[in-house]
Amino acid sequence: MINKNVIIRDDASQPDFTDRWLIEGNKYTYYVTIVDPIGNESKPSESVEIFLKDETPPTAPKNLSTGAFNGGIALSWNMSAELDAAGYNVFRSVGLDREFKKINTDIVKPGTPYYFDSTASSSQQYFYAVSSIDTAGNESRQSNPIRAYLKDNVAPDPPSNFSYKIENSMIVLKWGESEAKDLRGYFLYRGEKENVVPRIINAPTMTTTFIDSGYKKDGFAFGGKFIYKLTSVDSSQNESEKITLIVYAPDVKAPEPPLNFNVKNFKGRYVELYCGGSPSLDSDIYTIFKSTEEKKDKKLVEFSKTPFVYKDTSVIKGKVYIYYASVIDTSGNKSNSTKKDSIFFRDFSPPPKPRYVNAKVVGSKVVIEWNRAIDFDFAGYNVYRSDYPTGTFIKLNDKPIAETKYIDATGSEKNYYRIRAVDTSGNESKFHKTVQVRNNK
């Protein structure tokens, strides 16, 4: 019995009953009995068979994913949880706004939720979707589409007949076309060493000629050996094997001067000279020259590798030296010289401070005396005066004083003095102490 309560007879209406909890795809048999007021039940009526057709589609597959491999695109998704699952259909389109067409010939079995699309073309964007099918033939809506791209990994054919000629110091390169069907263009490389040949054009060029105007766009007047490499590039960025061409450009110009030439005093011990390389490609021998006020230019040192650092230990403190450099190329052409760099060579160690300083009034003047300071590059003394012992001290002499005595014609007994020794490099000693003028009256 499927009714919970007895259905009361009502002669005014036709008795009926609705069975709501049925499963689609099942066959059901029904019959009716009559019950009297005291509970006696009649024999069953004639039975009626009803088949409830399954018209409810299954749920769409979830978590569709793709992976690109050589030869095709692999798809996988979650297995259907439907009890009456019969399999899956796979759909493909070349755009979200284009028709999705079924690509599987046979239904994909319910226990194997994956598919390999071997008909996918390389360098083509695709969108895939999957649907579920139940045993009644009902088909779900398609899953959310997912994008896939099968990259082309096959390199194109290289170009042919790579050749050159030189016109007005420019290198004119030519080559034959590649036979690649999806050709995007050509990449060109240039270097001076076989293992260092960088690319010299940013994007592929479709032309089969190229005029190389050099590093500074003014040609190759300085000459040199150049290694060119050329490749074909397809629409998937696959690059062909490199073909090589070696070019010898003649030297028709003198090299450019060396770069970054400078000199500096290294702690008063020697003069350090730094010379960078010339931008010219065929630079060979570099020369540094030296001169003083007494002597004209003299070759100091030669070298062939840059950057170059040289220590000139033949300098004398207190003198001015002038340096410059030039370079000769492999063809014997000589460059202009670098800018001349002069330096006053000095040390940085101050001389000893004078001691036993005393100042006294003599007549209308102040006489200051002190003991001699001894140093190998001694130049003299500086005298300083102030109105206060800790005030600002002003130097009184224009040039270093050689004697150990100084007469201050404008001084008075109110003044204070300090004495400092000076060497030929201009280094000044510390003062021993501040002295006050002594009045002999």
Image (cartoon, helix red, strand yellow):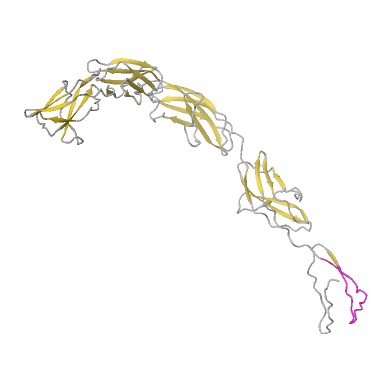
Residue 377 quadrant: top left
In the displayed structure, would residue 439 be above or below residue 293? below
Residue at image position (41%, 29%) is: 215
Q: Residue furthest bottom?
A: 12
In the displayed structure, would residue 15 be above or below residue 122? below
Q: Residue furthest right?
A: 43
Residue at image position (52%, 36%) is: 185
Residue 312: x and y, percent? 33, 18
Query: Is residue 75 shown in magenta?
Result: no
Residue 305: x and y, percent? 41, 19
Query: Is residue 35 shown in magenta?
Result: yes
**Quadrant, the C terminus:** top left
In the displayed structure, would residue 37 be above or below residue 255? below
**Quadrant, the N terminus:** bottom right
Bounds of the magenta segment: 29-51
Magenta segment main secondary structure = loop
Residue 121 quadrant: top right
Q: Residue furthest front?
A: 441
| Nearer to the camera, 153 or 11 | 11
Left or right of residue 229, residue 397 in this image = left
Left or right of residue 13, residue 94 in this image = left
